[in-house]
Amino acid sequence: MTDTSKLIEGRTGQWEVVLGLEVHAQVASNAKLFSGAAVGFGAGPNEQVSLVDAAMPGMLPVINRHCVEQAVKTGLGLKAQINLRSRFDRKNYFYPDLPQGYQISQFKDPIVGEGEVIVERDDGSTFTVRIERLHLEQDAGKSLHDQDPNATYVDLNRAGTALMEIVSRPDMRCAEEAAAYVKKLKTILVYLGTCDGDMDKGNLRADVNVSVCRPGAYEKFRETGDFSHLGTRCEIKNVNSYRYIQQAIEYEARRQIEIIEDGGKIDQETRLFDPGKLETRSMRSKEEAHDYRYFPDPDLLPLELDPAWVEAIKATLPELPDAKKARLQSQYGLTAYDAGVLIGEAAKADFFETAAKGRDAKLTSNWVTNELTAKLSAGNIEIVDSPLGPDAIAELVALIEEGVISSKIAKDVFERMWAGDGRPREIVEKQGLQQVSDTGALDAIIDALIAANPGQASAVKEKPQAIGWFVGQVMKETGGKANPGTVNQLLKAKLGL
Ligand code: ADP
Ligand code: MG
């Protein structure tokens, strides 16, 4: 393992950050985990609440088979242990938006055990985050404090919705790594179709555990597994964007360092991130498992999975991001970086593969990941809704490959394509954008230039790199349409190089 922590300079020396994440992912499902009530965004308050969700006396939970299947699928996608026998427990606490007075969760025996996620950094390198467990649990409802000056309203639409809590080991060492981990996890879930990954709607959110330690301590922890080498952690609840995750970590690490350097100690607590003030604030001191009086839910039998059913689910898994990345690299000769960008979205990789048929793969990948992606994100357009299809990009790439247009002119052509001016070949013909490779036309221009600039011409004989000046002039005269290869050839011949 290489150490990738970023050192933070304190008053008393250097510090490192250690991060472990608990990600809550809402299971993609039409119905809740233990009731048939609908799940969905945008319904009126309390329109999606069954008697089970409202915890009416005598109601009994019934497990939703689809949600279990989604959890198993996710576990398989995380290359994790699937536990054929798991159990639901009651986690007892009081909150107005939790009518049962307890949350049904999994404590001792989760449905999914240890797995791993391989994460790409911005520079294309990767690191591994170990997954400790994934368990199924119910979401709570929502308290609305802003509807009335004197009262709090409760909306139970979300109460009972199935969540997967995915707990990582403390394997991230800086804010960027934590954000990159969530990004990769989200990609995997979206590929699997087990969570829509919509962070704006809170369907994917992270509790971020942060601690700080002196250089070297983390290595000791990894060697021994002994947590006492690490600092005391604080947990920042429900952070729902990559930017907030990073900002919360930066602030929290600094806060902890200052306390320790001032001679204080960190209290293990749960904190909230305030995006307005860019700071974390204490919510409550950390509760321990025993505070919740966990016990097996007597309304639910242990969950027993048939190994054949698990195998059948395995057979339905799509090609996952890591496999797709490896295939794009080997099949098309792409770099790890390019392949990593393309697999960020399955639809983007598909678009590339369709466009790249018979074309230069690297060039096609560049057009998809640079120009096209920039336009799509500026217009907030999904790639599946792109006004330019793979065939249009392929045609543009073909024009470059055939030497009809230069890469520079191709950018103009692309702008016109995006503006709806037509197919690339049409645009090139209509606008007369073809490269001038015709030596006759270029001959005359070059002869005139040499005649008009005898000083430059003799300078080139002394210093051959100075030929660039002539190339530039020819480009200027031809509006960038001269074929640079032909121009160079002609210039060399005429200048006697
Ligand atoms: P709890 O259920 O009380 O939140 P867990 O054992 O489930 O506790 O751990 C929660 C998360 O905290 C895990 O993601 C784990 O990796 C992380 N974690 C544990 N110790 C530390 C630490 N010293 N620094 C940072 N993260 C930590
Ligand atoms: Mg926890």
Image (cartoon, helix red, strand yellow):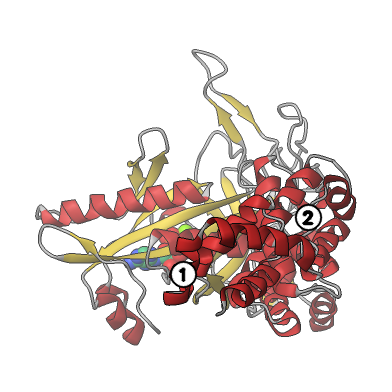
Q: Where is residue 415 drawn, in percent x and y? A: 73, 45
Image quarter (top left, top right, bottom left or bottom right) of the C terminus: bottom right
Q: Where is residue 395 drawn, in percent x and y? A: 85, 61
Residue nearest the viewer, comparing 434 with 62: 434
Q: Is 145 placed above or below 159 here?
A: above
Q: Where is residue 92 drawn, in percent x and y? A: 52, 50
Q: Name the residue under label 1.
A: 458
- Kind of residue at disc 2: Val
Q: Is mark 1 on a helix, strand or loop?
A: helix
Image marks 2 and 1: residues in contact by CB distance under 8 Å: no
Residue at position x 59%, y 34% from top? 142
10 Å crowding of disc 1: few (<14), some (14-19), many (20+): some
Please give left or right for residue 411 compared with residue 89 in the image.
right
- List the single residue furthest toward the top: 149
- Kind of residue at disc 1: Ser
Residue at position x 78%, y 44% from top? 416
Please give left or right for residue 110 compared with residue 76 in the image.
left
Ligand 1 image-quadrant field: bottom left
Residue at position x 35%, y 82% from top? 222
Residue at position x 74%, y 80% from top? 332
Residue nearest the viewer, comparing 437 with 347: 437
Q: Name the residue under label 2.
A: 62
Instruction: Tell me, yes or no, if residue 301 can be seen here.
Output: no
Instruction: Tell me, yes or no, if residue 353 can be seen here.
Output: yes
Mark 2 / mark 1, whichever is N-terminal? 2
Q: Is 466 placed above or below 92 here?
A: below
Image quarter (top left, top right, bottom left or bottom right) of the N terminus: bottom left
Q: What element carries label 2?
A: loop
Residue nearest the viewer, comparing 209 with 366: 366
